[in-house]
Amino acid sequence: MSKLICGICGAEVEPTVKAIDAHMSLHYAGAFVDVRNCRAALAVSEGWEDGREVIHYLADEVYTDDLREALLQAVEDAGSAINVSGRYRISDITKYPDIYAAMVSERWE
């Protein structure tokens, strides 16, 4: 099966609904780093359903040392630190190739 080409950034995307949705979320405000208890997790907000925000977190087995470093860098670039709980939007996903690779992995919980 051939890959699709994103009309916004030119990236190749697997032709599945999950992969396309994950990729398109990179161009919108859905992707963020969720910091709690001095741990950073990659998350995507799909919006609201029945009065609750629908959030998916990257599966634990996808995290690598490089991805953890990239998440920490994204938090620091947002002007914060790993010991400050909160949500930190990823404004320019192209700056973090390890985060981008994880986003399109289709391994969300």
Image: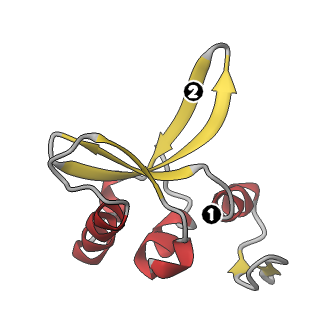
**What separation in Å lies between label 2 and label 1 (alpha carbons)?**
18 Å
Q: Are marks 2 and 1 in contact (CB under 8 Å)?
A: no
Q: Check the picture and name the quadrant holding the N terminus.
A: bottom right
Q: What secondary structure is marked by label 1?
A: loop
Q: Position of residue 95 (x, y in %)?
A: 48, 80
**Residue pointed to by mark 1:** 26
Q: Is residue 93 left or right of residue 25?
A: left
For residue 27, side relative to residue 90 (left or right): right
Q: Residue at x 55, y 79 (%)?
A: 94
- The correct choice, above or below, for 78 with respect to 10 in the image is above
Count neighbours of disc 2 (C-alpha within 10 A) and say few if under 14, some if 14 to 19, many if 20 or more: few
Q: Disc 2 residue type?
A: Glu
Q: Position of residue 99 (x, y in %)?
A: 44, 70
User: Mark 1 or mark 2, which is nearer the start of the sequence?
Assistant: 1
Q: Which one is nearer the viewer's eye here, 13 or 48?
A: 48
Q: Give the x, y percent position of residue 97.
A: 47, 81
Residue at left 67%, top 63%?
19
**Residue at 32 percent of width and 64 percent of height:** 71
On screen, residue 94 above or below 63: below
> Taking 51 as reference, is 39 above or below it?
below
Residue 103 screen position, x and y as percent: 53, 64
Q: What is the number of the mark on residue 53? A: 2
Question: Which quarter of the figure has residue 62?
Answer: bottom left
Residue at far right of view: 7
Residue count near mark 1 (Cα–Cα under 10 Å), binned few <14, some 14–19, many ≥20: many
Determine the secondary structure under disc 2: strand
Residue type at tag 1: Leu
Q: Quadrant of residue 36?
A: top left
Q: Is residue 80 above or below residue 70?
A: above
Whether residue 39 sits left or right of residue 105 in the image: it is left
Left or right, 31 with reference to 67: right
